[in-house]
């Protein structure tokens, strides 16, 4: 946690200003009881109205100074803590951007959201309260002890009996709260995960009538969080009555001792009142410190989770001396094998192929054969376990990732649109594209017609996740986004599955007109989509190449391909 708090040095002037404001506030707290004692002993008891008014005005002035100092402290601590949390969120976001898909798989989306929001909020609260309480409590504690003992050492000795009780109570409760705090953050992760799955899969849930099952699943996660929160809450609630009992006990003990000294004439009534207030300041300082102690375990758990993200070393990084090849538009796999970290068997094995400008490579195979994995290796979402992936003749591990990905137009299997306008989505990979270029990309992707039907055309709003578009429309907009970039390599990961056959054929024909100088790699399940490809790669269930060649060649040489074709096309369509 200290590692994260070092980031506060950026706000050192705010911290120093807060310390000054807190010191001023404590100064007023220490002098007000003295003035109150003077009013009672030298004003009220002897009937000196002038003294009461004079000292009262001084107390009012000091109170105003204390109020101003408190406002300044609140403002500075808020600015410092919120700036700290803003910077931390930015750093976590930047770190997440550097992660490969392997790191994302390790943390999970729900956990990353919790860490970026709830965990950082916990740290923000500790910083804010720490700048206000952790600074004030020691000052008030030391000041209260000095002023109390200078007024009446006999009565002030009560602190030596009550303070240890307070410290022991805080330590015992804190030891139990630390594991509960860590567990609470894990339970919040689980609630977020279940909620996220429910919201993203609402259509499937309703289609299969599993509302009751999902409610039970969420109730279990929610109840687990409630149970752990109640344990934490009850533990904290135990502390407050205990602290109040010790505080009240201290007050009664001081008054009992003070009455005897007043009766003996060795102490004035006002001094008794002053000592009571000083001891209350001392005990309240302990209470503030105890509150910080109860907040620190949960903040420490949050800090540990944030540090896990910030300390994670990405498995995919840019080389120190990247190579920037001339643009050619070639992709080559040389004996490539890839296995996921948690898998015993490779996803793909000994893959070899090469595709150049103006050529189209199609990849087909059964579900889980590794088709999408091959595409993910090209932009370095993952790194090959063995072998080489070459783009423009250079191993992708020797290229800068930004340079590598600027050469690629990628259309994922699941169409992803971002909230904004259609034009903003199409310019996602080509920020300087003109409106004419956007319309051309939309026309090639067969999206122009439904865009024109919208009142604002390219400026029409896209809802979150593209919810106001059909599946086929989202796919065509995703394709248009890749086309607008005019890359040298096109990667289509089953990107035509939601299109009807007519639109599919028209789109591929128009696409062929602009990809004469680019390499095109298509992953598809439809045979009709890939029949005209220059080369078709057929994968078996083990992720190995079962056949490679043109459509007509594979019909003669590859049994797996014949089975796929015969399951989709009639003998007349196949030409057999």
Image (cartoon, helix red, strand yellow):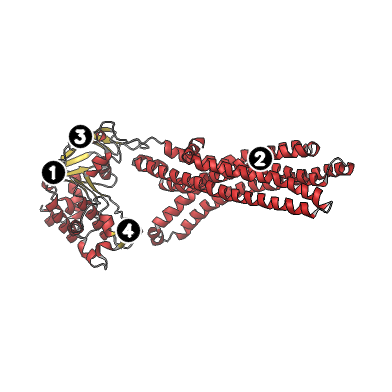
Disc 3 to disc 2, C-alpha distance: 62 Å
Point out the frontmost of discs 1 and 2. 2
The answer to whether residue 458 is above or below residue 532 is below
Q: Which mark is residue 555?
A: none
Residue at numbered disc 3: 394
Residue at numbered disc 4: 420
Q: Are marks 3 and 2 in contact (CB under 8 Å)?
A: no
Q: Secondary structure at mark 4?
A: strand
Give x and y (percent) for residue 258. 83, 43
Disc 3 to disc 4, C-alpha distance: 37 Å
Q: Earlier in the sequence, mark 1 or mark 4?
A: 1
Point out the frontmost of discs 3 and 4. 4
Horizontally, residue 261 falls left or right of residue 349, namely right
Disc 1 to disc 4, C-alpha distance: 34 Å
Q: Earlier in the sequence, mark 3 or mark 1?
A: 1
Q: Earlier in the sequence, mark 3 or mark 4?
A: 3
Point out the frontmost of discs 3 and 2. 2
Q: Earlier in the sequence, mark 1 or mark 2?
A: 2
Q: Is residue 287 visible?
A: no
Disc 3 to disc 1, C-alpha distance: 16 Å
Q: Earlier in the sequence, mark 3 or mark 2?
A: 2
The answer to whether residue 453 is above or below residue 280 is below
Q: Are marks 3 and 1 in contact (CB under 8 Å)?
A: no
Q: Secondary structure at mark 2?
A: helix
Q: Which mark is residue 357?
A: 1
Neighbourhood count class around disc 4 (C-alpha, 10 Å): few under 14, some 14–19, many 20 upward:
some
Q: Secondary structure at mark 1?
A: loop
**Residue lying furthest front:** 50
Horizontally, residue 68 falls left or right of residue 221, namely right
């Amino acid at each position: 946690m200290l590692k994260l708090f070092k980031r506060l040095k950026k706000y050192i002037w705010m911290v120093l200003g807060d310390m000054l404001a807190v010191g001023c506030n404590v100064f007023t707290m220490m002098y007000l009881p003295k003035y109150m004692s003077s009013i009672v002993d030298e004003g009220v008891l002897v009937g000196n109205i002038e003294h009461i008014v004079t000292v009262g005005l001084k107390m009012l002035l000091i109170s105003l100074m204390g109020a101003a100092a408190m406002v300044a402290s609140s403002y500075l601590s808020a600015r410092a803590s919120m700036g700290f949390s803003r910077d931390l969120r930015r750093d976590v976001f930047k770190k997440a951007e550097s992660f490969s898909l392997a790191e994302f798989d390790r943390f999970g989306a729900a956990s990353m959201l919790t860490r970026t929001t709830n965990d950082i909020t916990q740290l923000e609260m500790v910083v804010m309260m720490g700048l206000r309480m952790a600074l004030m409590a020691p000052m008030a504690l030391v000041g209260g002890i000095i002023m109390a003992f200078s007024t009446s050492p006999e009565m002030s000795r009560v602190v030596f009996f009550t303070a240890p009780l307070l410290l022991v109570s805080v330590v015992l409760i804190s030891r139990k709260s630390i594991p509960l705090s860590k567990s609470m953050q894990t339970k919040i992760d689980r609630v977020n995960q279940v909620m996220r799955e429910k919201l993203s899969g609402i259509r499937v849930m309703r289609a299969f009538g599993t509302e009751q099952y999902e409610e039970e699943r969420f109730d279990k996660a929610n109840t687990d969080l409630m149970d752990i929160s109640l344990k934490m809450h009850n533990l904290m609630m135990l502390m407050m009555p205990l602290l109040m009992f010790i505080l009240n006990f201290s007050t009664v003990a001081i008054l009992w001792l003070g009455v005897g000294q007043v009766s003996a004439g060795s102490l004035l009534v006002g001094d008794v009142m002053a000592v009571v207030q000083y001891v209350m300041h001392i005990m309240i300082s302990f209470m503030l410190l105890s509150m910080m102690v109860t907040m620190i375990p949960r903040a420490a758990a949050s800090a540990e989770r944030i540090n896990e993200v910030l300390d994670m070393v990405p498995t995919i990084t840019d080389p120190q001396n990247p190579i920037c090849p001339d643009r050619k538009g070639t992709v080559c796999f040389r004996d490539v094998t890839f296995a996921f970290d948690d898998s015993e068997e490779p996803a793909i094995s000994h893959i070899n192929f090469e595709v150049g400008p103006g050529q189209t490579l199609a990849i087909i195979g059964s579900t889980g054969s590794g088709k999408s994995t091959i595409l993910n290796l090209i932009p370095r979402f993952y790194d090959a376990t063995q072998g080489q992936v070459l783009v423009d003749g250079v191993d992708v591990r020797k290229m800068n990732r930004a340079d590598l990905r600027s050469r690629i137009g990628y259309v994922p299997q699941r169409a992803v649109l971002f909230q904004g306008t259609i034009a903003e989505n199409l310019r996602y990979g080509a920020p300087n594209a003109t409106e004419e270029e956007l319309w051309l990309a939309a026309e090639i992707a067969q999206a122009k017609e439904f865009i024109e039907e919208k009142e604002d055309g390219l400026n029409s709003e896209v809802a979150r996740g593209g919810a106001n578009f059909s599946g086929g429309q989202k796919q065509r907009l995703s394709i248009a986004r890749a086309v607008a970039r005019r890359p040298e390599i096109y990667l289509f990961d089953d990107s035509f599955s939601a299109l009807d056959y007519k639109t599919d054929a028209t789109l591929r024909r128009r696409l062929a007109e602009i990809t004469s100088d680019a390499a095109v790699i298509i992953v598809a399940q439809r045979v009709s989509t890939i029949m005209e490809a220059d080369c078709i790669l057929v994968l078996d269930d083990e992720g190995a190449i079962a056949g490679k060649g043109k459509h007509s060649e594979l019909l003669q040489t590859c049994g797996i391909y014949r089975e796929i074709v015969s399951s989709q096309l009639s003998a007349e369509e196949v030409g057999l």
